[in-house]
Image (cartoon, coloured by chain):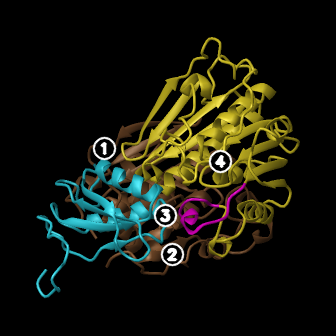
Amino acid sequence: MSGAPPDPRPAPALRHPGAPLDIRGYACPLTYVKTRIALERLRAGEVLEVWLREGEPAESVPRSAEEDGHRVVAVEPLLAPGGGYRVLVEKGVGTGGGRWP
Amino acid sequence: MSLSDRTALVIGAGGVGGPALLTLAAGGVGRLVVVESDVVETSNLARQPLFKEADVGARKAAAAAARLRALFPSVAIDAHDGRFDAANALDLVRAADVVVDGSDNFATKFLVNDAAMRARRPLVHAGVLRTTAQLLTIAPTGIGGCLRCLFEAPPPPGSVPSCAEAGVLGATAELAGALAGAEALRLLAGERGAYEGRLFTFEARSARGRLVLVRRRVGCPACAGTQPLESTAAAACEVSSSRPGSAA
Amino acid sequence: MALTDDRIARYARQLLVPGFGEEAQEQLGRSRVRVVGADGVASAALVTLVQSGIGKLWIEDHEDVAPADVEGWLYPPSAVGSPRAEAARAVLAPMSRFVSVEAYPTGGVPTATLVLAPSTAQAVASAEAARRAGIPHVVAEADGDGGAVISVPPGAPCYACARSTAGAGRPPQPGIAALAALAAEELVLMIAFPGTIPGRRLDLVRGVTTLRATTRLPGCVCAGATPAAV
């Protein structure tokens, strides 16, 4: 991302267009609704970073994303205040938002 | 024919229970018994017709009773703010002429099924998943199967379904509940149920309806009225089953 | 314009349906739905539409609440004798802060129409007006506790081609709420997914549906050039 400060984390070899989606304050199923909408707004191949609470959201959100045809690239502990998990999801090809299957 | 001396028990006052209650009340049922333990949330207002904006945060049982009494002052409304469980199941079911299951988890659905079979009361089971409405009527005197004949057992506790399975098109839920209410009215009028021994599913996008025979499973303990009544704690997430028909 | 957080929270369960995304909910939010007929039979349709998240609900009904209308989802006995459109608005508006509920404004151009008129003549006229304006519409015909729901997307065979001609249906019974909910559901699908629902007729008899595609009657005026979509 041009203009952004250098990222101390190893740069993923993936397109990572936006700020992380922090949904640690939401309850299921709102966690997945917001994730899904954020994924809809991306182009295929772009990556969404989602911050999730430990427990049910961290389990069900990645699984739901895969069922929707996206690829879960990473699930790792989140090193930010409040803790939780950091999940990277790559938007799948042919999973455009709003299309009736 | 007057239904003013009849009682309908409806489990849940939400997406399926709400429309069923409205339809039953509109049909002139004398008494409605509602069992509901939740609080009204904003997402409920996309499909649960008993509630309005000002009800968010209120106990569903109380809000449902208030709406029903305002619309149908001549119908007696008994609202139970609590769960349908093994302790109250038989008493509640025995006091009704028909039972409509609009609950949103399989543990309750199986308990309603077992109690209705034990008390020999007709039961209308209705559910919705995504864009599909599903209905099955279990008549104690019929030859059709019950929920246990259809599903054998609820999914193991602790099996977490995916959030995507919580998807429900609001209009489909209202349709499912209205169909359940209409079926309950048929049963109260002494007619044979349209879904007796036949599972009816309607998928909204394709607009296709299907009827699938549900036969009584030989040796089914629920049909024999001998299935022990068990309550299991509801799962933490609002969606507690990965099987069709669990959302309401 | 993206969905705000409060709308995401309201329509969360609908937004989780595969294929129903932000765009579908926004289509609903932009819609202006004219409903012709707001009696007890139509009541479940009005409630279902409001709860689905349409933008505007325009109620076209010039009658007063009749005693029979109390057998529905909207009208308490105290409303009998008062204008139906206003009595409906009084119950519907508090159900959703995202929907504007009004009497149909003269000259208003809806983006979708639902016809639940008790008279055949009114139903045919309202459907024809929608067809000529290129507006997707659904017409419901009551028959006992069921009836028929005819869906007419732009360019499809019209209501006059598909409607029942065997005479008026039996008087409506309270179970008819299911027919009204079905009609509302068809319209919701046509609004949320424009172009994906074909012209079709659903018959609801004793709680069970049968489906058939609608076909044009030879010589019907609807066989002319496809009206421009709104």
Q: Is residue C228 left or right of residue B202?
A: left
**Mark 4 secondary-structure assignment:** loop
Q: Is residue B121 left or right of residue A27?
A: right
Q: Is residue C8 left or right of residue B177?
A: left
Tag 3, which chain?
A: C
Residue displayed at 73% across by 48% down: B24
Callout in the foreground (4, 2): 2
Tag 4, which chain?
A: C
| Tags 3 and 2 touching, CB below 8 Å | no
Q: Amino acid at mark 4?
A: Pro
| Tags 4 and 2 touching, CB below 8 Å | no
As drawn, the residue found furthest toward the top would be B218
Distance from Cα at disc 1 to Cα at disc 4: 28 Å
Tag 2, which chain?
A: C
Q: Which residue is mark 3?
A: C52
Q: Which colour represents chain B?
A: yellow
Distance from Cα at disc 3 to Cα at disc 1: 34 Å
Q: Which residue is mark 4?
A: C172
Which labelled disc corresponds to residue B161?
A: none
Q: Which residue is mark 2?
A: C99
Crowding at dot 3, Cα within 10 Å, few <14 / some 14-19 / many 20+, comes out as many
| Quarter of the figure with residue B98 | top right
Sequence order check: which comes first, mark 4 or mark 2?
Answer: 2
Q: Amino acid at mark 1?
A: Leu
Q: Main secondary structure of the magenta part?
A: loop
Question: Quick one: quadrant of the N terminus of chain B?
Answer: top right
Q: Is residue C3 above or below residue C197?
A: below
Crowding at dot 1, Cα within 10 Å, few <14 / some 14-19 / many 20+, comes out as some
Q: Which colour represents chain A?
A: cyan
Q: Which residues are magenta?
A: B37-49
